[in-house]
Structure formats: C-alpha cells, structure tokens
Amino acid sequence: MSDRAAQIYGVEPGCTHGRESMRGLIHPEYRDRSRDESRRAAATRTDYDMEYPLLGDCPVWVSARGRGVYAEDGSLVQMLGVVQDITARKTAEAALRASERRQRFLADLAAATQPLAAPGAVMGVSAKLLAEHLRADRCAYAEVEDESVFVITGDHPVGVPSIVGRWPVAAFGAECVRLMRANEPYVVADVATDPRIGPDDRSAYAATNIGAVICVPLHKHGRFTAAMAVHQRGPRAWAPAEIELVSTVAGRCWEALERARAVEAERRLHTEVAAERSRLEEVFRLAPAFMAVLRGPEHVFELANDRYSELVGGRALVGKTVRAALPEIEGQGFFEILDRVYRTGEPYLGSDVRAQVRTADGALTERILDFVYQPIRDAAGAVSGILVQGIDLTERHRAEIELIRVTAESERQRRLYETVLSNTPDLVYVFDLNHRFTYANEALLAMWGRTRADAIGKSCLEIGYEPWHAAMHDREIDQVAATRKAVRGEVPFTGTNGRRIYDYIFVPVLGANGEVEAVAGTTRDVTDRQAMEQELRDVDRRKDEFIALLAHELRNPLAPIRNELQVIRLAGTDSAARDRARAIMDRQLAHMVRIVDDLLDVSRINRNKMELRRARVPLAEVIASAVETARPQIDEAGHALEVELPPEPVFLNADLTRLAQVFSNLLTNSAKYTPRGGRVRISAAVVGDELVAAVRDNGIGVPAAALTTIFDMFSQVNRTTERSTGGLGIGLALVKGLTEMHGGTVTAASAGEGTGTTFTVRLPVAGAADERPAPDPAPGSDGPARPCRILVVDDNRDGAESMAEMLGLLGNDVRTAHDGLEAVAAAEAFRPEAILMDVGMPNLDGLGATRRIREQPWGAGVVIIALTGWGQDADRAKTRDAGCDGHLVKPVALDDLQKLLQDLRAGR
C-alpha cells in the first residue's frame, strides 16, 4: 500500500493489511457489497471497480479499481489496484441531488398549497409534506401570540401524539425564547445532552415527545409572529440544509397562509356583499313599507316592491315613468314634489297625505300615506334618482277609529259591569291559579269586612276562612283548572252578617289559546231563600192538611142535614120532630156558611179587597156581640165565661161586625181547645191611647215552637184524629188580618202544653177626631112582605126549583128559567116584579140577560137581584154595572132575601 493509499484509508504507511482488515475500514453499509464485488472479480477474472465510504465522522469516499494476479492453477495470488479519494466529487453529487430534491419538494409544496383557501389546510399540508421530506416524527406550524405563546392549530405527527394547543415559549427553555426573539433558529440534536436545556425545561420536551428539534422563528414587521418546528423523538444530527429548508418552508408557509387568508377574506367579503345585497333586495321586496327607486328627471321606475305594487292595484311599473304609470295622481301635487326633490336635492317628508289612486278594478280610492322622497346621488354627488318609501296608514286610521269606538264601548261596558258588580247583592270574585283573590266586588268586601287592598292577593285561608273551608275551595279551584268544568256547592260562612248559608259556583276563565287563566266565581246568600222554601213547604203541607180537614169539616154538617131530611120524610104528622129536624138543619147550614165566609174573608184580606165600614163604636157593644156569637159553643162545652171591661165607656174607630168577629173567633178558639168544664176569660183595659184586650183560657196551651206560626194560614196545633173540635186553621189568620186592618196587633202567649193560652189584642182608642156618626138604618118596613111576582133564574135546576118552592110557600107567584136567553123570554111573557138572577149560566150569562131586560120598556122598573156564588167587591161592581139592584151570595138566608126584596120594592 502506497503512502497516498495509506493516507486515504487513514492507516500507517508501510504496514501490511489483509483483505479483511482493509474491509474493516469500509463503512458497514458497503462492506458486504465490497466482498461480493471482490469475489465476482476473482471468479470471473475481471476488473474490480467499486466506490464506497470509509468509517469516520466525516466519511471519505474512495474509488477502488484493481485486477487479480492468478497462479498457474488459476488460484488468486494477489490483487493489484489503484485507489482514489473521490470525496469532493461525491459531496458535489450529493449536494446536487439534495438541491434537486429540495427544489422538487418546494415545487410540490407550492403546488399543494396554491389551491388551498383555508389557512388550516395550508398549515396541515405544509407540515405533512415537510415531515415526510425530512422523515421527521412530527412537523408543526405555530402562530405566536404576544411573542410568548405558541398557538398550534395543526401539525403532522408520525408515531407521536399531536401537540395541537397552546404552549408557552418559555416552557422550552430560556435559550429557545432568546433565539426566537432574535429571529435565529433553535436547533437541538439531543435534548437529553444539550447543555442549554435545564432540568426544569425538559418536562415540556418530555410531554411533547421531543428528542431533537429544529424550530425556526418568523418575524414580520419587527415582531415574532410564527414558527415552524420539526421534531424527532430520538437524537438527530440536523444538517444545515435541513435547517435552511425548515426556514424556507416557514417563510413560504406564512406566505401561503397570508395568501389563503387574503383569498378567504376576499371570498368572505364577496359572500357577505352578495348576501347583504340579497338581504337588501329581500328587505326591499318584503318591506312593510312601500318602496320604489325612480331614475332620471322623468322619474322612471327602476325598482318597485310588492307593497308599492299593491298600493296602486298591482299594475306593472318598472321601466315606466311615474306620469305614465300613475296618471290618476295628476293634479294631486306628487309630480311637482318629485321634480322639486330631483332639482334641489332636498328630501321631502309627507305625513297623513291623502291620495286618490286606482285599484285593480279601476275604481278610485282614497289612501292615507306617510312617505319620504329621498334623493339618490351618484359618485360625483349629483342627483340621479329618488328613493320613494312610505307607509299606507289607511287601514291603521280605520283601525284607530274602530279602536276609539271599541275602546269607548269597552269602557262603557266596563263601567256598566263595574256598576253591576259593585251593586249586585251577589258576591263576585276571581282567583288566580295559585288560589289567590285577584278581584272581589263591594258586596264580598263588605261581607268580609275588609278593604280591597287588604283582600286582593290573599288566599281564602289568609282572608280568614276556616281551614277546612279554605282547603275545599283550593281543591275546587284546581279541579276547575284541570277539567275546565264548573263546580257548584253550598257552604255556611260567618261574615259581618253573621252565619249565613251561601250557594256558589266556580267557572274557568279561558285565555286566547283556550288555556285556563283564572277561576271566576259568584256566591249568593240563600239563607232567606232556604227559609222561604221551607216556609213554602210548610204552607204547602198545611194547605194539603187544610183541604183534607175542609172536606172533613164540610162533611160534618152535611151528615146531620142529610139525617134530618130523612127524619122529616119519616116523621109524618109529628110536627115536633119536623121542627127539631129543621132547627138542626138550620144550625148545621149556618155552620157551613160560617166556614165558607171565613175562607172568603181571609182571601179578601190577603188580596186587600176587604173594606171596613168604620164608625165610632163602644167596646162594650163589640164584646157583647162577640160573646153572643160564641156563647153557644162555650155553653155546650160547659165552660165558665168571665167578662171584665173598664167601668168607663171606651170607644173604637172600628167596623163593629168585623171587630166582633175578631173576639168571637178568639172566644170560640178558646172554647175548642179547652177541656170540658174549663174557664174562658175576656178582659180589657186602656193603657195610654191603646186598648189592651186579652182572651185567656186554661186549655191545652201552645208549644213554644208554634207561637210564631199560630196566626199563619192553615196553621194547626196538636191536631189529632181523635180531637174533633179542631178548626180549619184559618180562624186565627182571620183574627190577625182583621186586627191589623184596624191598626192593631195580636199576639199569643203560653207557658207550654196544658198551661192554657192568652191572646192579646192591642187597638188604638178612638179620640174626638175619630168620631163619626153611625150608619143610618137601611130603609124598609118592619111589616110582613106582601106577595109578588118573582122570576127565579139559575142553571142549577134543583137550586131554582127549591128557591121557587120556598118563595111560593110564602104566597108569591113564582116562575123559573135556566139560562139567560130563557130568562129574557120568560121575563117578557111573565112581567115579574122581581128577578133572582144567577150570573154564571150557559148561552147567555146573568149579566147579559140583565142588560137585555133593562133595555126593554117594561124592564126598567123590575127589581133584579144577583144571586150567585161570587161575592167579591169586583163581582158586586160587575152586577151593579149590568143593572142589578142588589147582590146576594149563595146560600142566602130567607130572612135576608125577604128584607132585601122588601127594601128594594119600598124604594121603588
């Protein structure tokens, strides 16, 4: 080996080296290839030619050429050859290849990032291509915030985690911060051994799996704005070309990002402008205001929105001048205003302007408008058009007029409802869904004894309702809200009026969408109504009892009457028996008449139809008449009667007959309800200007509960089927009515059953001013009536025949008729002196028959007496108006009939 060869291989000159020791100097990657090439040359006896690097920190490239020397047997004896140091050539070739590869990479990078518009895509593609080109484990592009924080939004990791996120620059060491701010690359071949990285800084490298790093800063406008980093998870010696490439890629990546951002900004701007234009066009088209753009001095429609088109009847406008498109507004001043705005450049504002425009059907209609004519200027500032925009107020004006009307009506209704609700006796209120009062009318507030401010917003419990009562209403409010159905009930409540019974109803108050918004209620005090209903039930019950008792009372006298009729038929010539029978029949008939008269009297009093014939009458005469009437019953019952009157005369302003009826009823009542052999006492005394008269007995007495109802119609006390003395329950009602008609009062007192009863009558005593003369006696004669011609008219044939027979037995000439027409004919033929005329008859009633008879010349002097079952004052007036001379109510006593006939005939 020559000295030069030894120098090239880096061995001592003059030393001998075998093939294997020489092969050990070759770079391990080329050793096997060198051996194989030697064997090939020996085997083929051809030249050996190979290039390979030697071992060392800075490898030396060697070109080795040689040929083998062989023995006669063909075996290789030695190799002879030449070696040449080709390091310079190889370095030049590698640099050329690296440059070509770098240029290809940069071209590929430009081609890959050129079409990208999204900055994130630019960063991602750049990191990926650089990582692949350098065969690095991770490549990342970071933007720098405040020159102190890496903001990594995209990286390309290979076998290591992504580090997208925010990383403080200081976390990677002070040297990293210094170099980044100095705009110098930060290169670390081995993080573990690099002395610039302190132990405290290595945690950031460990967290990001960085064993070796190139980080190239990027400064723009004097500020640290970005950085490109390449990482290897293990140690790596970075070539200067690699550092330079990273710096180049960082610059180009920034430029691509800026270009992408500019493109993105431009695209966004174009999109926003297009969207804004679209929105403006849509706003223009759909604006609630009518809008149009007019161009040029002739005001040609360039745009007109839907509202403008609708305003003018939907006609086509675009491309037409305003005068051609809207000829009907000529003379209304609009064209002149447009011309002035275009000429002066001053806007015009119109408010509540009335315009006549033509609708789609060709009719002119008035519209009320608010509008503005706004000049449009070109780039030079000259007026090029007019923007028209406004609002059609026509419907709003109509709505405002209607609103004023509806508001006034609503206010009137509100005042009406408020007046009604404030003055109704019913309780009216509203609950919210939380059970609290939101309204209460005056009646309810008065019942509570609270003011509105003290009540509204409170629940029933807070108002003072008993807990069970408040809880019940709370449940009912929830029920109404849930079911939308009314709830009704009845409940007692103690308010300012005391404890009363109330009927109430809760109903839902629905909102516009049908939801329950509140619960309204009304409550009515039914205490008096319930009492009245109970009273009516009691009256109805008493009426039923009265009807049954009336039937019994009427049958009682009918039985002896019927019996005595049989006695008369069977008595033959026994005149004494017939006389007794007639007396009994007279008494029983009189009893029936009294029953009917009492009923009629009560009816007259209740209907305010009874008239009193008042006069100054002595008390003694009233009591004497009453005792005379009641004496038979008192004596029959074996009672002792005591009468005690004031010693001095006492006068009353009274109807003697009716007032005597008051005391006779009280006396007969005591006689009825006192056991046989009892005592009945009537006394009177003057107290002040009042007469106090009392009827006392020691009879069965009156229970305390009955004292308040004993004077009611049909009222009965202690009625039993065994006690036959009880009346109809109308006697005391008649007493009360007659006493009150005389300006007095009557009360009852009893200590209970078996203690007797006291009835006290209080009447005003007559003074000098009350003195009135007693009525004159009726004209007439006390002598016996002379016989006369009499016509009896009654559709009841038995009644007519019995009356005719009775009058005939008195010596009168009597005829009968049974309806009105028959009566007129019979009267004309018979020419009676007197007619007894029934009123209610078929064919022609008694009143009509009387009028027809009075129309005849012979009928003027006939005495006509109405004989009917109707006895009211109105009935008497009707018969009098028809022409009757008198009015008698069935059944009539013979004496009364004879006296009336005698008096009437005497007056003729």
Image: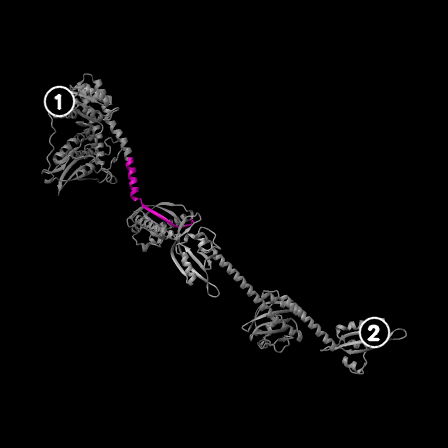
Q: Please, which residue is most extreme toward the left here?
A: 648
Mark 1 highlights which residue? 785
Residue 754: assigned label: none
Q: Please, which residue is most extreme toward the top here?
A: 573
Residue 813 percent coordinates (x, y): 17, 18
Pointer 1: residues within 10 angstroms few (<14), some, or many (20+)? some
Question: Which sits in the foreground, 708 or 678?
Answer: 708
Q: Is residue 201 above or below residue 398?
A: below
Q: Tell me if I can see residue 135 in this picture.
A: no
Q: In the rendered view, how is the structure colored?
A: one colour
Q: Tell me if I can see residue 247 in this picture.
A: yes
Residue 86 percent coordinates (x, y): 76, 77
Mark 2 highlights which residue? 47
Precedes in sequence: disc 2 or disc 1: 2
Q: Is residue 569 magenta?
A: no
Q: Quadrant of the N terminus?
A: bottom right
SS state under label 1: loop
Residue 841 percent coordinates (x, y): 25, 25
Q: Amino acid at mark 2?
A: Asp
Q: Residue at x 71, y 72 (%)?
A: 97
Q: Quadrant of the C terminus?
A: top left
What's the CA distance linking mark 2 and mark 1?
A: 199 Å
Q: Which residues are magenta?
A: 512-541
CB within 8 Å, label 2 to label 1: no
Residue 206 percent coordinates (x, y): 61, 71
Q: Specify whether 489 is left or right of 268.
A: left
Q: Is residue 858 above or below residue 20?
A: above
